[in-house]
Image (cartoon, helix red, strand yellow):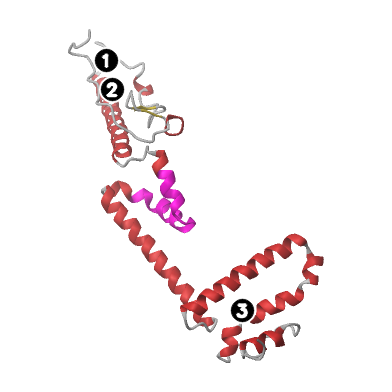
Amino acid sequence: RPGGPGARVAEPQAKVGGNSTDITGYHAKRNEFDPDYDNDAELPLAEMDFGPNDTPEEHALKSRMLMIYNERLSERARRKQFILERGLLNFKRLQTQERKRTKEEREIHARFAVFSRFHSAAEHEALVEGVVAEHRLRARIEELKDYRRAGIHTLAEAEVYENEKRRREAERTRLKSLGASAAGMTVGSGAKSTVRANRYLMRDGIGVGLSVPVYGATRELQKLHGGIG
């Protein structure tokens, strides 16, 4: 009867924001997942009972099965509690965080997610953010080394270099879409881009001897040296 010795005590309803039951399978009013973790844990016990004619060995085996079942229930409860405490059901918030990250940062977060069970939420966040910061520093160092190899000395020159690089990539994509015939008609434009890309190497004497088509190259070099207004 309700309130009797065998009555199940209702767990307090968890407050979950941004939860999508269709995606997470979590029903907040029941405080349950559907399907639950280890959803078949009850099956081995479905037909089991303790009878008066059980031998000591049978009794011990059934007792051991109950112990295993309780361990599986404990693991199920632990996992549910972990998900609720870490806010992993807030699907909208998680989506917003993912959109703000780069592809590489998303991969780092996914790779380190397995270690989150060994840390508190704050400790795990600090760990992952440290790895992300290291990745950003390494990427920036490689970017600066590329600038130096291109003969760039200042950030202003780097900005010009990046603008030219983006323009060349856009032109390359456009030519690829037009086909080989259109690409042959605009070879002069490609030659000018090559000269502009190597302007800093030529200034330092590093790019002397680079193979550049003649068309348009002389005019660009004259511009760099003030020969043409």
Q: Identify the residue at image location x=57%, y=89%.
A: 203
Please tell me whether residue 14 belongs to the stretch shown in magenta: no
Is residue 83 something one can see in this rendering? yes
Instruction: Indicate the quadrant where residue 1 lies.
Output: top left
> Which label sits on residue 50?
1
Q: Position of residue 66 (x, y in %)?
A: 27, 25
Left-right relation of 167 to 129: right
Residue 222 is labelled as none
| N-term mark: 3 or 1 | 1
For disc 3, the marked residue is: 197
Mark 1, Cα crowd under 10 Å, few <14 / some 14-19 / many 20+, is few
Labels in figure, total: 3
Q: Residue furthest left?
A: 5
Which element is circle 2 on?
helix
Q: Amino acid at mark 1?
A: Phe
- Three-letter amino acid code of the residue under disc 2: Lys
Instruction: Return the residue at label 2.
Output: 62
Dividing the picture into quadrants, the one containing residue 198 is bottom right
Q: Which residue appears farthest toward the right when viewing the image?
A: 181
**Residue 173, how many percent across, how many down?**
68, 63
Question: Residue at coordinates 44% horizontally, 44% vertically from top-left?
Answer: 95
Q: Secondary structure at mark 1?
A: loop
The magenta segment is: 94-115
The image shows residue 52, relative to residue 102, as above or below, that is above
* Three-letter residue code for mark 3: Ala
